[in-house]
Amino acid sequence: MPAAAAGTSRQSGRARPREEVGLKRANFGDGPGLPTLLLLPQLLILLFFFFIPSLRALMQSVLLSDPFGTSVQFVWFENFRSLLASSDYRQSIAVTFWFTVAQNVLTLGSALVLAFATDRIVRGRSAYRTIILLPYAIAPAIAGILWAFLFNPAVGPLAQVLHGLGIAWDPNLNPTDALILVTLAASWKHICYDYIFLVVGLLAVPVSLMEAAAVDGAGPIRRFVSIALPMLGPTIFFLTVMNFIYGFFETFAIIDAVTKGGPAGATNILVYKVFVDGFVNLDLGSSAAQSVLLMSFALICTLLQFRYFDRKVNYGV
């Protein structure tokens, strides 16, 4: 009997799953009640602020209604055909594309330089990082007003410097100057976001590799480009995707505060055109169709980035 009991005990011990040291099993009960309750706030937010508005926009995009909503007509895809045939809408697509690409390159490049510079600082590193992160606490509309003042052709101090250098700077009349101004403002506001992720990514770079490269005679820039930058590939890819989303959707307040889409539609990006046509011109069907197309463009750009750039990213350390 004792031998049999010992054998049974050994068998039950072998059948018991081995748990890794330091891990704990989470138990939410037998039924779906508690997990559903924990997920319910987020599900309600998605329902009321994403799914219902998206469904409403899809329905509105195939309707033609007067500004007061007294008469509604089902027009199928006429709103989409009118948009794609409009030269103003095609110009807005081109402006959005160049604006998004320019602010993405400028934001990511500036954040990389700042992350490299602050990583080299020994004294006062925390103070420098705090100063760099300050613009992230400023509202986009305030950031736009600040840049509009600095580059105002009449009273802006930076505009006066450009005039002193012989540059005829006037974003109120020159479309190129206006596009440059909103690109700088949008990039300055978003550099902090990229900087946070890049600094954290640099902290994950093995110090032994950097020290070994320094012993071999590689300078700071060579070590950053040859060792740190490839290891930041996943972070850079993530930031590239997020910067495109930022350029498509989150720059409305800056455009509205700085140029209001002008001059001559030079800064009338898609998200601002949705607002103007829907809330100013009261063309609700066209505005809804534009919002659907804008979401489609963002989705296509994201999928293309994952399709062609994700395979080039090295996720190994």
Image: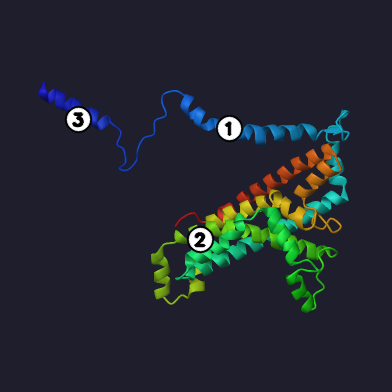
- Residue at label 2? 199
Q: Along the polypeptide, which appears first: circle 2 or circle 3?
A: 3
- The crowding category of the residue bearing disc 1, from other C-alpha atoms within 10 Å (few below 14, some 14 to 19, many at least 20), is few
Identify the residue at image location x=57%, y=60%.
Answer: 133
**Label 1 vs label 3: CA separation?**
47 Å
Q: Name the kind of residue labelled 1 in the image.
A: Leu
Secondary structure beneath dot 2 equals helix
- Residue at label 3? 10
- Residue at label 1? 43
Secondary structure beneath dot 1 equals helix
- The crowding category of the residue bearing disc 3, from other C-alpha atoms within 10 Å (few below 14, some 14 to 19, many at least 20), is few
Q: Which mark is residue 284?
A: none
Q: Residue 36: x percent and y percent?
A: 51, 28
Q: Tell me if label 2 and label 1 are in contact, CB under 8 Å.
A: no
Which quarter of the image is occupied by the N terminus? top left
**Label 2 vs label 3: CA separation?**
52 Å
Q: Give the number of the mark in front: 2 or 3.
A: 2
Considering depth in this image, is 58 or 297 the residue closer to the camera?
58
Considering depth in this image, is 54 or 193 the residue closer to the camera?
193
In-image side of 76 versus 215 (left or right)? right
Q: Name the kind of residue labelled 2 in the image.
A: Val
What colouring style does the render use?
rainbow
In-image side of 150 versus 128 (left or right)? right
Compared to residue 308, the image places residue 47 above or below, namely above
Q: Residue 256: x percent and y percent?
A: 77, 53
Considering depth in this image, is 50 or 255 the residue closer to the camera?
255
User: Seen from this angle, which residue lies furthest front?
Assistant: 155
Considering depth in this image, is 149 or 26 the residue closer to the camera?
149
Q: Tell me if label 1 and label 3 are in contact, CB under 8 Å.
A: no
Q: Name the kind of residue labelled 3 in the image.
A: Arg
Identify the residue at image location x=15%, y=27%.
Answer: 6
